Image (cartoon, rainbow, N blue to C red):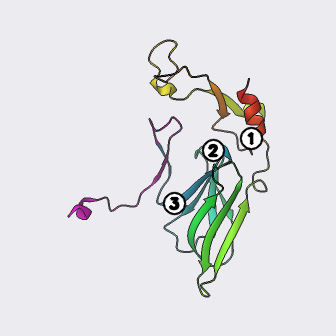
Amino acid sequence: HVASNLQTTEPDVFISTDGGYNFRLVLRGPHAYEIADSGGLLVAVPLNTINPKVVKFSTDEGNCWHTYKFTNDDIKFTGLLTEPGGKSMTVSLWGYHKDTKKWTVNVIDFKTVVTRECKEEDYISWTPHTSLNNKPGYLGCFWVKVKPSRRLSRIHGAVTDITKIWTLLQK
């Protein structure tokens, strides 16, 4: 039977910042996670805790994680959600109360948690698939010419303003 040969250890969370060519470990153990703020915010809830009261969040591509207590209640966690497209700083945690079985939604607006606004120096020049560069003038894409853009550096700890990103990308 195939199931007897499948992995039985708990999965860890890995992240890639180059389109899946390379991955690095960012969290040990299973987590539910969402990507918000156009990639500038990662939010994770540990799945090996029956009634989590805190979420973990990162503003630097998973290099450093912080915790935020979102409830004092014993809630059976069932899901994590952000708006489609991941541009919002708002994350919803779904679950139900342990004793009453009543459903609850905890909404966290990370704009109130992470208050520092991004500045121009928080961005770096970035070209997709640069790890594939092996020829002079090659920008990492086989079929089209890729124009370098800007993205948040790995050490920024700030809230992104999407209108500022689009302005910076036009430079």
Say which residue appears at 61% left-offset and 47% top-offset: 64
The image shows residue 80, relative to residue 41, as above or below, that is: below
In the picture of the structure, the residue carrying the numbered disc 1 is: 162
Mark closer to the chain start, 1 or 2: 2
Identify the magenta region.
Answer: 1-23
Q: Residues within 10 Å of mark 3 (few under 14, many from 20)?
A: some
| SS assignment at label 1 | helix
Considering depth in this image, is 27 or 151 the residue closer to the camera?
151
Tell me which label, 1 or 3, sits earlier in the chain.
3
Kind of residue at badge 3: His
Question: Could you say whether the residue bearing mark 3 is in a helix, strand or loop?
Answer: strand
Secondary structure beneath dot 2 equals helix
**Lateral position of residue 17 relative to residue 112, left or right:** left
The x, y position of residue 122, in whole percent, is 72, 34
| Residue lying at the far top of the rendered structure | 136
| Residue 34 at x, y percent in the picture | 59, 55
> Is 84 or 52 nearer to us in this picture?
84
Kind of residue sitting beneath label 1: Ile
Q: Is residue 68 left or right of residue 25?
A: right
Mark 2 nearby-residue class (10 Å; few <14, some 14–19, many ≥20): some
Give the spatial CA distance, label 1 vs label 2.
Answer: 11 Å
The CA distance from mark 2 to mark 3 is 17 Å
Q: Which mark is residue 39?
A: 2
Q: Which residue corresponds to mark 3?
A: 31
Image quarter in which the N terminus is found: bottom left
